[in-house]
Image: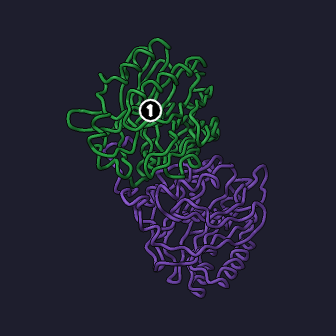
Chain colours: A green, B purple
Amino acid sequence: MDVIRVAAAQIKPILGDPEKNRRKIARFLELAHNDDVDLVVFPELSNSGYNFSSTEQAFATSENIPGGKTIKLLERMAHEYSMYVVVGINERDDNALYNSAVLVGPEGYVGKYRKVHLFFNEKDIFKRGNRFYVFDTRIARIGIMICFDWIFPEAARSLALQGAEIIAHPTNLVLPYWQKMAPLRALENRVYIISANRIGIEGDLTFTGRSIIVSPKGEIIAEASRTHEEIIYADIDLRLARNKNVTPKNNVFEDRLPEAYTL
Amino acid sequence: MDVIRVAAAQIKPILGDPEKNRRKIARFLELAHNDDVDLVVFPELSNSGYNFSSTEQAFATSENIPGGKTIKLLERMAHEYSMYVVVGINERDDNALYNSAVLVGPEGYVGKYRKVHLFFNEKDIFKRGNRFYVFDTRIARIGIMICFDWIFPEAARSLALQGAEIIAHPTNLVLPYWQKMAPLRALENRVYIISANRIGIEGDLTFTGRSIIVSPKGEIIAEASRTHEEIIYADIDLRLARNKNVTPKNNVFEDRLPEAYTL
C-alpha cells in the first residue's frame, strides 16, 4: 500500500495493574478503529507501568509473548478491527524479563522485539535483546525500537537498512531530548518514526508526553500534548520512505561508503 | 588540556579568487589570535569558492596539500599565533581534485581529510575520500568531516569512536536542516562540533550562514548570523567530551551492542 493512516496512543499505564492497562489499551484501540487507523503504536511497558518498586512487582506484571493476556487481547481486537498494533510489553521468558514490544495484525501475532539499549535502572530488571527486526506486513515494512534506543544511531540505521519504512517506537521518555532531536533520525534514514510516549509520574520519574510522528523529510507531522492521554494521527505516504534521495544526485543509502567507516 | 577556546570563522570566499581568499583567511586568523583562540575552523573550499562555472575553474583554484600557497600561509600564521586551524581546501593531486580540509598547528602541517560524501554537482568535479581521521594534537583530539557528511551518522560516529573530542566541520550549507539537527549528532557521540559555514550567493546557491558550536550535551553554545562575516567563540571543557555517560548508568559507547547492528 502507499498511503495509510497511522497513530500513536499516548496513554498513562497504571503501575502494577495489568487488568486496568488492558482495559485502557482496548479503549484506545476502539478510538483508533473509529478513525480508520491502519497502525497504532502504544508506549513502552504499556501492560505493566515502568518504575517497579521491586523485582517481584516486575515479575507479577509480566507475561509471555505470545500467549500472554495482553497479546491475546491484541490478537482478538487487531483481527476484529483489521488493524496493526505495536505495544510495549513487560515480557517474561522463563526466569528472565525483557522490555519488549509486540507487533500484532489482522492475521494474528506477527513478532516481537526485545529492547537492546536498556536505560538506567532497567539494567537491574531486564535482560537486553540482541537483534533488530523488520516485519513485512500487508500495510508496510515495520521496524521496532524502544525508547532509549533513540540515542544510538545504529538502532534506527539497522532497521532502515533492513528495509523499514516505518519505525514504531514505544517510549517512556524522561530525558528532555528526543522530541526535539527526532527529525534528524527520521531524515538520515528517510523513514517515518512513530514515537508513542506515555504521560504521568511514577515515583521520581516524570514522563514527558509529546508523542510525535516524524516524516522521512525530518518534519514533525503530528504531536501530542505533554500532559493528556490522547491519540495523534497522520496519513502517511510510504513512497516517501522508499525514496532515499535527499537531492536528485544524493541517496542516503547509495552514498554510504562502509569501508570508510570505523564502527 | 581541559579547557580551550575554539572558534568558527564564518566568511564569504570569492569564487575563483584564491589570492583574495588567502587575504581574508589571514585577516580572520588575526582576529582569532587577538581573542586568544586555540582552534579556529573555516568553511569548506575557503581557498576557491564553491559553485565552479567549469572544471577548468576548479583546477585553476586548486592547490596541493601540503605545499600549496594557502597551506604555506596557514603554516606560517599558525606557528606565529600558536594556534590550530582547520580550513576547507580545493585540493589537487595529480589530475584529481578533492574537496578536502587541512589541519595545521604551531608545529606545522598536521594532516588532511578528503570529503567522503560528496554533495550534488561536487560528484562531477571531485573524487571522494575513503577514510575518516582523528588527529592527536597538543590541545585536543580533533576529527574532521565536511559539510554533507553530516547526514550520515557513520561519519561523526567513526570520528568519535576513533577518539575525537572535537569534530571540526567546514561547511558550505545550502539545505535547511543541519543547524537545527546538529544537537543530536553531538549528543549521540558526546563530542563538540564546530560547524564553520559560509555566507553569500553563488549562481543558484544561497549559503545559509548560522555557523554553530555544539556541546556534547547537545546544546548550541555559539551561533552566527545568517548573513554576515563574523567569528563565533566558545570556551569548551574537553572533559565533557571524554565523558560518554548520559546517565550514571548509561554510556553511549559502552552501551553499544555491535553484534545487534546491521550496518
Residue at position x 36%, y 40% in the image: A115
Q: Residues within 10 Å of mark 1 (few under 14, many from 20)?
A: many
Image vertical order of residue B24 relative to residue A163, above or below: below
* Foreground of the two, A87 or B256: A87
From the viewer's perspective, is residue A47 above or below residue B223? above
- Tell which of A164 and A106 is nearer to you: A106
Helix, strand or loop at label 1? It is strand
| Location of the N terminus of chain A (image quadrant) | top right
Amino acid on which the number 1 mark rests in the picture: Gly
Q: Which residue is mark 1?
A: A143
Query: Which of the 4 quarters of the picture holds residue A162?
Result: top left
Question: In the figure, is residue B149 to the left or right of A13?
Answer: right
Chain of residue at mark 1: A
Residue B116: horizontal and vertical position, in percent? 52, 53
- Number of numbered discs: 1
The front one of A163 and B120 is A163
Q: Is residue A249 visible from the viewing direction of this image? A: no
Q: Where in the figure is residue B126, as x and y percent of width and height?
A: 59, 54
Residue B214, horizontal then vertical, whole percent: 58, 63
| Residue B84 in sight here | yes
x then y, percent, for residue B44: 63, 62
Which residue is found at the position 71% from the left and 65% from the top?
B224
Tell me where residue B36 sits by quadrant.
bottom right
Side (left or right) of A195 relative to A258: right
